[in-house]
Image: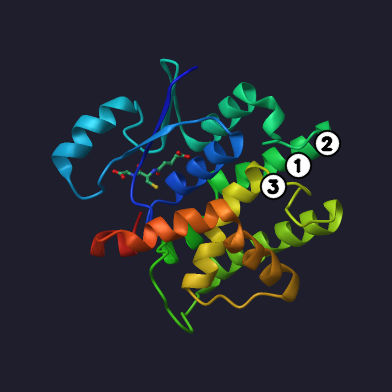
Amino acid sequence: MATATLSLSSKNYSSWSFRAWLIARMSGVKFKEVIVPPDDTAARAEILLLSPSVLVPCLTYDGIRVWDTMAIGEFLNEIAPKAGLLPKGRAERAHCRSICGEMHSGFVSLRAALPMNIKGEFKDFKIWSKAQSDIDRITTIWRECLGAYGGPWLFGKFSIADAMYAPVATRFLTYDVKLDPVCAAYATRILAHPFVLEWIEAAKLEKEEIEELEVEF
Ligand SMILES: N[C@@H](CCC(=O)N[C@@H](CS)C(=O)NCC(=O)O)C(=O)O
């Protein structure tokens, strides 16, 4: 059987680690986690040699290295085609890839102003207009997908798209973002998914609170 490792960073702060880990769990491929401590420079320098981008996540499968979350998702979809990481129909797949692309390359204001911090709790957090525009676009995406494909997940069955937006659901909880009933129900559903719960539990057990990462990661 092929051996796979996934290099990850903090479970509390690293949203890209969270997405790739979720996709890897959904794929059913067995993998070993390699945790790169975000604040230990020597350990990071050594372990990040694994990843040409010097970023996490990075997947190594049978000697093949894949870095960058979407590439990891596409690779795992090839390795485990029956896992349903992408929707079956061509049009749905194109839609799924498009909204994953929006998350992957966009929502910069949301990411900067509301960094993932699973342990954090900020009641009545002030959301400025640029971050609010990102939130409005994300909730439009969610409503359109849930309406078009009937839920309970964005494309009916749990897919890469739900993994891509899972750290948004944790941010909405952390920063007390007010949502319409459809989006609130979807966010609650994501937060109750067994793999998501497993990640959240591990994030809560992390000791470090890294001030720098509370403002940018
Ligand atoms: N586009 C990359 C983004 C990866 C990324 O920004 N990773 C962050 C952690 S969430 C990172 O490695 N930051 C540098 C560091 O931790 O030293 C992807 O999709 O994988």
For ligand 1, which image quadrant applies? top left
User: Is there CB contact under 8 Å for labels 1 and 3?
Assistant: no
Local crowd at mark 2 within 10 Å, few (<14), some, or many (≥20)?
few
216, 187: nearer the viewer: 187
What residue does disc 1 label?
A: 95
Question: Which kind of residue does numbered mark 3 sit on?
Answer: Phe
In this rendering, is residue 36 above or below 194?
Answer: above
Residue 135 coordinates in the image, percent (x, y): 60, 65
The structure's colour scheme is rainbow
- Label 2 element class: helix
Local crowd at mark 1 within 10 Å, few (<14), some, or many (≥20)?
some
What residue does disc 2 label?
A: 91
Res 64 → quadrant: top left
Q: Is residue 155 left or right of residue 23?
A: right
Which residue is painted at 72% across and 59% down in the image? 142
Question: Of the numbered discs in the image, which one, if any, rests on residue 158?
Answer: 3
How many numbered marks, from 0 up? 3
Select label 1 or label 3 by which is in front. 3
Disc 2 to disc 1, how far (Cα)? 6 Å
User: Is there CB contact under 8 Å for labels 2 and 1?
Assistant: yes
